[in-house]
Image (cartoon, grey):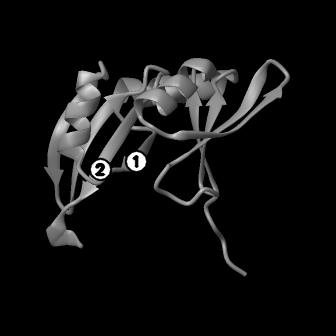
C-alpha cells in the first residue's frame, strides 16, 4: 500500500481567469473542464510532468476558503510552489508578459525562489534547485 499525490488544489476567485492565466501565461495544459453546477471541475497539468499529477483550480465560493486565500495573500505567503528549470529566465519571460512579482529571484539555501501574483487572489512561488544542492 502506498500513498501518492495526484491532485493539488488551489483556491481561485475566478475559474475562467485562472484557466487563462495558468494556461496561456504559465503554459500549463487543461486536462479536465467539467461543469459542476455553477462551477467547474477544472484541472491543469504540466507539459513536462506526469499527466496524472493535476493542479485543481477550486472556486473560493466557501467563505472559509475566501478568508484563507485572503489571509495568505495579505501575509505574502504563496499558496503553492511550482518548479522551473531557470527561475531567472521565467522571471524575465513572465515580467515581459505583464505578470506582477512580489519577490524577484532570490537565493534561499538549496533553491532560488521568486513569487508572483496569479491574478486570481494567490501568490505562487517559483523555485529552481541550485546545482550545488543536486
Q: Position of residue 105 (x, y in %)?
A: 17, 41
Residue 14 visible here: no
The answer to whether 69 is drawn above or below residue 16 in the figure is: below
Q: Give the spatial CA distance, label 2 vs label 1.
A: 6 Å
The answer to whether 1 is drawn above or below residue 43 in the figure is: below
Q: Residue furthest right?
A: 37
Query: Of the numbered discs in the image, which one, if any, rests on residue 82?
Result: 1
Q: Can you tell which quarter of the image residue 110 is in?
A: bottom left
Identify the element where label 1 is drawn.
strand
First-in-chain label (2 vs 1): 1
**Tag 2: Cα neighbours inside 10 Å, few (<14), some, or many (≥20)?**
many
Q: Nearer the viewer, residue 123 or 25?
A: 25
Q: Position of residue 130 (x, y in %)?
A: 19, 62
Residue pictured at 30% horizontal, 22% vertical: 97
Residue pictured at 18% horizontal, 43% vertical: 88
Q: Can you tell which quarter of the image residue 36 is in?
A: top right
Q: Position of residue 121 (x, y in %)?
A: 47, 22
Identify residue for label 2.
Answer: 127
Residue 72 visible here: yes
Amino acid at each position: 500500500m502506498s500513498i501518492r499525490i495526484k491532485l493539488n488544489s488551489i483556491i481561485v476567485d475566478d475559474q475562467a481567469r485562472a484557466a487563462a492565466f495558468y494556461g496561456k501565461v504559465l503554459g500549463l495544459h487543461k486536462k479536465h473542464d467539467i461543469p459542476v453546477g455553477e462551477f467547474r471541475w477544472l484541472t491543469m497539468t504540466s507539459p513536462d510532468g506526469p499527466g496524472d499529477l493535476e493542479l485543481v483550480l477550486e472556486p473560493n465560493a466557501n467563505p472559509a476558503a475566501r478568508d484563507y486565500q485572503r489571509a495568505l495573500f495579505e501575509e505574502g505567503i504563496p499558496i503553492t510552489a511550482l518548479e522551473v528549470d531557470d527561475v531567472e529566465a521565467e522571471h524575465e519571460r513572465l515580467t515581459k508578459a505583464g505578470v506582477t512579482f512580489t519577490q524577484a529571484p532570490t537565493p534561499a539555501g538549496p533553491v532560488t525562489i521568486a513569487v508572483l501574483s496569479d491574478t486570481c487572489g494567490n501568490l505562487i512561488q517559483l523555485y529552481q534547485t541550485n546545482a550545488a544542492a543536486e
